[in-house]
Image (spheres, helix red, strand yellow):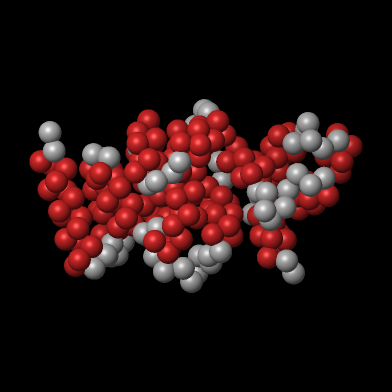
């Protein structure tokens, strides 16, 4: 089966009845009322969106917006993994990176644009993120991290994210990430990476 269809099956199987009701409501201007009334699963809705060319493996923006509206970050992560060509079970450091993402999303807030620029997102992408999620700072941060992860692929590591946070003077958030991973029994990097983090911390503390 097509990997994208496998993803849609997986997403559909994880939706609650209330999730489905909200999705149908959100799609009321795209899908006819009669069709919506007969839908019994998320896959029914996804199939119609596929038929209407509102959705395909190369155009997942609508799907992302729908899942974001549901606040189903677990399902957004599956979509992230699909787009990045990663499997959660095999990607090295994936679990640690997800923990870091959750902490950053909960704590960065209005400083997200500063972080986005340090992560080398273009102004066009930053504006696009703000337009897509105008009412949710946490989703703006999460989308920033998603775009960065896809662009950097294997270079998108916890240590690089921590470095970026410290460059933004977001040392408290960086500390929260490192403490959480230490609690998990994880190591964010080698001795060389630790030395880089220490140097960046010292540099930040000495900055005027």
- Residue at the spot x=65%, y=48% of the render? 60
- Residue at the spot x=13%, y=38% of the render? 207
Where residue 126 sits in the image (x, y, percent)?
A: 47, 37
Of residue 109 and residue 144, the one placed in the foreground of this image is 144
**The quarter of the displayed image where residue 181 is located:** bottom left
**The quarter of the displayed image where residue 26 is located:** top right
Q: Give the left or right position of residue 140, taking residue 197 as reference.
A: right
Of residue 62 and residue 59, the one placed in the foreground of this image is 59
Where residue 128 sits in the image (x, y, percent)?
A: 54, 35
Q: Is residue 159 above or below residue 134?
A: below
In the picture, the quarter occupied by the N terminus is bottom right
Q: Give the left or right position of residue 83, taking residue 206 as reference.
A: right
- Residue at the spot x=36%, y=59% of the render? 157
- Residue at the spot x=46%, y=36% of the render? 123
Q: Give the left or right position of residue 111, taking residue 73 as reference.
A: left
Where residue 16 sits in the image (x, y, percent)?
A: 66, 47
Of residue 139 and residue 145, the one placed in the foreground of this image is 145
Residue sticking out furthest to the bottom: 90
**The quarter of the displayed image where residue 17 is located:** top right
**Residue 79 in view:** yes
Residue sticking out furthest to the top: 135
Where residue 102 sits in the image (x, y, percent)?
A: 41, 48
Q: Is residue 176 above or below residue 10?
A: above
**Residue 102 in view:** no
């Amino acid at each position: 089966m097509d990997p994208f269809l496998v993803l849609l099956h997986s997403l559909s199987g994880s939706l609650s009845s209330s999730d489905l009701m909200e999705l149908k409501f959100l799609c009321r201007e795209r899908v006819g009322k009669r069709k919506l009334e007969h839908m019994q699963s998320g896959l029914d809705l996804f199939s119609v969106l596929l038929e209407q060319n509102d959705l395909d493996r190369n155009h997942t923006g609508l799907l992302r917006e729908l899942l974001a509206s549901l606040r189903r970050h677990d399902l957004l992560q599956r979509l992230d993994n699909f787009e990045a060509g990663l499997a959660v079970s095999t990607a090295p450091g994936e679990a640690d990176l997800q923990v870091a993402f959750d902490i950053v999303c909960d704590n960065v807030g209005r400083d997200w644009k500063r972080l986005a620029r340090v992560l080398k997102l273009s102004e066009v992408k930053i504006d696009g993120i703000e337009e897509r999620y105008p009412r949710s700072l946490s989703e703006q941060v999460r989308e920033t991290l998603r775009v960065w992860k896809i662009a950097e692929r294997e270079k998108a590591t916890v240590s690089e994210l921590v470095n970026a946070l410290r460059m933004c003077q977001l040392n408290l958030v960086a500390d929260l990430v490192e403490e959480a991973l230490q609690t998990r029994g994880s190591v964010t990097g080698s001795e060389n990476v630790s030395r880089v983090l220490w140097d960046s911390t010292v540099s930040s503390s000495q900055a005027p």
